[in-house]
């Protein structure tokens, strides 16, 4: 393949990072020939010729000279329209939009097959950590048991400040926002949705099964309280926001996103600040650990660059695991052990606990530790969104193998 001519959608932090890494690298025969932005009036870096910019998507999509679409906009619906239009025109795409991918991946996989075109998105999950391609190529077998980790750098930075620097939660959040790790509206990160969307994408490549985000229990860290932090310290653990997909039997798997009590012997215990860490567990190789920056301009751009280089060699995801005859089925009929701290929300009345191991009442707050089915958490999740309530997972999977 000759020089790749790129049509770039989006020129924010990541888009500018892509422009910068393409300018620096010497081994990628590619150039950006047109950049589509929302507003032509917005100031741009001075060294870029203004003629490179357009506000018309069709100026890129209908240009026969463009070989590859790179899409890094933050609007999921606009991203979906662009990616769908490109694939229908048989133009390969590199995307970093995890929300769009998580909600439409099943359809986009079918479009790739139907049109014989590639969609690559390693940058959508864990930034510079090559999780997807490793799961797609290296772990291409049925021995994989679990993928678990810290997939969101913003929430991890906040919790690191809380547990490692004794910083109050509100102050840690403000620091994350000031440093650009969290947005002015941080809910996408701290409520767990960013981790959820990454987990959906990872699961397709880990197990060959697509599960829609609405069917997965997701709970974030926005309601964490001093009493939860104090309890974790007393138990000599940290609270981390953890996403996991795990086989619970040979023919079933489950997945969820929740705060978790993490003990010092776990790899992810030492994943701090804005870093991500992913543990991949298998039957014959126990645990393997991947660590790196999961977000930011240049780390994400480096992952986009990797996909651009892969296209030079005509690489595409084969989704081989989706063709396995004995793919595991998604289940929520599994028992979790959770910590629930509450004041006004009547947690014991809402959730049908099968067993309560510990219970505490005080004038400040109440908490309990009990066993409850994941299906019950999903069924009652609308009743579990009170500001007076915090939930955390107490790990039960593979505790005998660590």
Image (cartoon, rainbow, N blue to C red):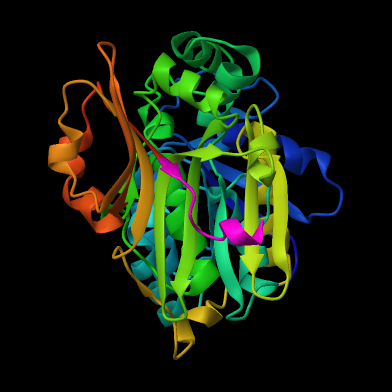
The residue nearer to you, when weighing 204 against 123, is 204
x and y, in percent, of residue 311 in the image: 67, 65
Residue plotted at (29% across, 65% down): 333
The residue nearer to you, when weighing 288 against 52, is 288
Residue 396 inside the magenta-drawn segment: yes
Residue plotted at (59% across, 35% down): 14
Q: Quadrant of residue 342?
A: top left
Residue 314 in view here: no
| Magenta region | 393-402
Residue plotted at (41% across, 17% down): 227
- Hey, which residue is sitting farthest right in the picture? 26
x and y, in percent, of residue 88 in the image: 39, 69
Q: Quadrant of residue 20?
A: top right
In the displayed structure image, the side of residue 18 where residue 119 appears, left or right: left
Residue plotted at (65% across, 74% down): 283
Q: Is residue 289 above or below residue 137?
A: above
x and y, in percent, of residue 339 in the image: 37, 37
User: Looking at the rendering, in which quadrant would you find the C terminus?
Assistant: bottom right
In the displayed structure image, the side of residue 285 where residue 280 appears, left or right: left
User: Looking at the rendering, in which quadrant would you find the N terminus?
Assistant: bottom right
Q: Is residue 137 above or below residue 214?
A: below
x and y, in percent, of residue 122 in the image: 60, 55
- Hey, which residue is sitting farthest bottom in the picture? 325
Q: Is residue 399 above or below residue 21?
A: below
The residue nearer to you, when weighing 371 against 320, is 371
Residue 151 inside the magenta-drawn segment: no
Residue 359 in view here: yes
């Amino acid at each position: 393949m000759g020089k790749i001519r790129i049509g770039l959608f989006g020129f924010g932090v990541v888009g500018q990072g892509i422009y910068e890494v393409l300018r620096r690298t010497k081994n990628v025969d590619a150039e950006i020939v047109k950049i589509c932005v929302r507003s032509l009036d917005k100031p741009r870096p001075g060294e870029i010729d203004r003629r490179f910019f357009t506000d018309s998507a069709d100026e890129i999509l209908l240009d026969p000279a463009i070989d590859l679409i790179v899409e890094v906009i933050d609007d999921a619906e606009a991203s979906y329209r662009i990616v769908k239009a490109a694939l229908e025109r048989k133009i390969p795409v590199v995307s970093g939009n995890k929300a769009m991918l998580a909600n439409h991946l099943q359809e986009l996989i079918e479009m790739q097959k139907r049109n014989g075109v590639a969609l690559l998105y390693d940058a959508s999950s864990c930034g510079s950590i090559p999780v997807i391609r490793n799961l797609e190529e290296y772990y291409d077998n049925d021995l994989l048991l679990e993928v678990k980790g810290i997939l969101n750098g913003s929430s991890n930075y906040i919790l690191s400040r809380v547990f490692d620097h004794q910083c109050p939660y509100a102050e840690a959040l403000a620091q994350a926002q000031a440093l650009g790790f969290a947005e002015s509206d941080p809910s996408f990160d701290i409520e767990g949705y960013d981790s959820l969307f990454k987990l959906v994408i990872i699961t397709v490549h880990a197990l060959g099964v697509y599960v829609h985000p609405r069917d997965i229990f997701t709970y974030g860290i926005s309601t964490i309280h001093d009493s939860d932090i104090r309890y974790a310290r007393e138990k000599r653990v940290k609270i981390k926001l953890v996403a996991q997909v795990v086989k619970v039997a040979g023919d079933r798997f489950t997945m969820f996103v929740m705060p978790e009590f993490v003990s010092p012997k776990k790899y992810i215990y030492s994943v701090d600040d804005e870093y991500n860490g992913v543990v991949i567990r298998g039957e014959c190789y126990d645990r393997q650990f991947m660590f790196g920056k999961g977000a930011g301009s240049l780390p994400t751009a480096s992952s986009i660059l990797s996909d651009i280089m892969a296209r030079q060699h005509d690489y595409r995801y084969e989704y081989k695991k989706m063709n396995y005859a004995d793919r595991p089925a998604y289940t929520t009929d599994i028992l979790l052990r959770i910590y629930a701290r509450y004041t006004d929300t009547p947690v014991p009345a809402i959730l049908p606990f099968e067993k309560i191991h510990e219970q505490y009442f005080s004038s400040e707050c109440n908490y309990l530790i009990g066993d409850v089915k994941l299906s019950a958490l999903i069924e009652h999740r609308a009743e579990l969104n009170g500001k007076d309530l915090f939930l955390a997972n107490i790990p039960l999977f593979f505790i005998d193998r660590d």
